[in-house]
Image (cartoon, rainbow, N blue to C red):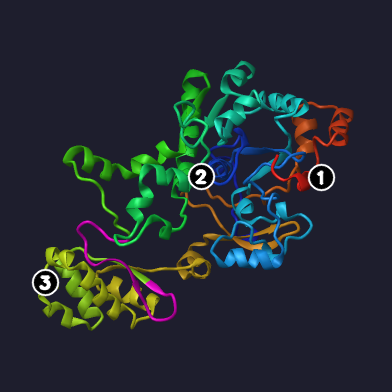
Amino acid sequence: MSETARPMRDVAHRLPLEGIRVAEITVVWAGPHVTQLLGEWGADVIRVEPVNAIQPYSRYPERILDETAARALAATGYTLAAYPDFQAGTDPWNRSPSFNSHARNKRSMACNVRTPAGREAFLRLIQHVDVLVENNVPQTIERSGITYDVLREINPRLIMLRMPAYGLDGPYKNYRGFGTHVEGMIGHHLIRTYEDGSPEEMGDTYTADALAGVMGAFAVTSALRSRERTGLGQQIEMPLAEAFLPVLGEYILDYTMNGRDSVQEGNGHHSHAPHGIYAAAGEDQWVALDIVTDAEFEAFCRATEAEALLKDERFASAATRRTHRKALDAAVSAVTQRFDKDALFHTLQEAGVCAAPVHDDLDCTRSPHLAARGFFEDLTIEGVGTHRYPGIMTKWGNTPNWIRKPPPRVGEHSEEIYVDLLGYSRAEYEALVAQGEVGTTYPPDVLARGVG
């Protein structure tokens, strides 16, 4: 959306979280996704991040790649360090596409909570915020002395969202894990596995991280609503594994009620057939199908001129199609690979068949549907350039919204936060800069040490 196309906001169109200030000490995706959503809807989000030590899995300065390595990594589908034009530049930590996609509408405060000076500044910050979000291993927060019991003495109205992998107690408390690890622990990877394969073939989807972002933002806004009534803050514990586990409720109930263990489904379905991803015309092109009824299967066959399948007794009913699903999948794939995936998508939808093309990243950015809806927004970032980014994922009838500001450079807003918000004198602030507590880059010796 261009600047000229953006409507002016008046009082009636103020974003719902304007006036709420959020501090975050987050890494990877789940935690940053929570604060991304809060920031998109008006909260003032302040990233607390050190420059005299490397915060792992955040801006990724611990792994700076040259062009050859960046291209090779991106070719595997891992794009976290695929800098624009594959050039690291002089400040690759400000050029990470992963960080820049979720850090829009945020500010950055250089602060290391593990040092005495940094901890003092952080505790001052807590006096001025409504919410703190963190998704570190619990012992990191405990060793830093910034647990909720400590912080609520400073700010009784504070809402603190904690998102460890496995919880704040129990035998797995301090086990480290990303979304893929907790998905493995609770069985999601096995369910996704093809029946003749093994889990390592599935790759990483990090579904648990994506879901945790939405659930965490919901939990925070619910706690803010509760505080309006009670005046009290509270700690919210939302383990990554337990937040994702309810998604598997169907399989859990099937076991507890029927004693039936889940099977490896891959792209299949326990009763629908055909159901899955099928080859389309061209190299590595695919279309997704989900056919339930006999009428839908007949519509598929007639729309693709594959009426011969209707005469095959193995495919005569939903039950027999499921029984002979391997033969069915082969027959359907032989049909679909004659068609362009997008053309087949439109043809089948018009025939009343649930179908969709399987798009890669470039396909998505070129989607005429998303373009017509104005989903993507061009965002200009200093030192990075202008690129297209995913926009706001919900549209509100009475509240126009868009990306308000680009992601912050490391430490970019330190001066205004320390001096204007926290009340540091100019001399005190300059002393912190001289001590290396505050800055806008990582010193060479820090980069040489790697993760702090």
What amino acid type is highlighted by mark number 2? Phe
SS under mark 1: helix
Name the dominant secondary structure of the magenta segment.
loop
Q: Quadrant of residue 116?
A: top right
The residue pinned by badge 1 equals 445
SS under mark 2: loop
| Residue 65 belongs to the span the image colors magenta | no
Residue at position x 38%, y 76% in the image: 341
User: Is tag 2's residue or tag 3's residue first in the polypeptide sequence?
Assistant: 2
Residue 156 placed where, x, y %?
58, 18
What amino acid type is highlighted by mark number 3? Ala
Residue 109 placed where, x, y %?
72, 38
Eye-nearest disc, 2 or 3: 2
Check contact, mark 3 vs mark 1: CB within 8 A: no
Residue 160 placed where, x, y %?
55, 28
Which is nearer the eye, 420 or 154? 154
Locate the N terminus and report the quarter of the image it occupies: bottom right
The residue pinned by badge 3 equals 316
- Which residues, given as a range, are shown in magenta? 267-286
User: Is tag 3's residue or tag 1's residue first in the polypeptide sequence?
Assistant: 3
The numbered disc on residue 178 is 2
Q: Is residue 246 above or below residue 397?
A: above
Indicate left or right for 199 with 325 as reference: right
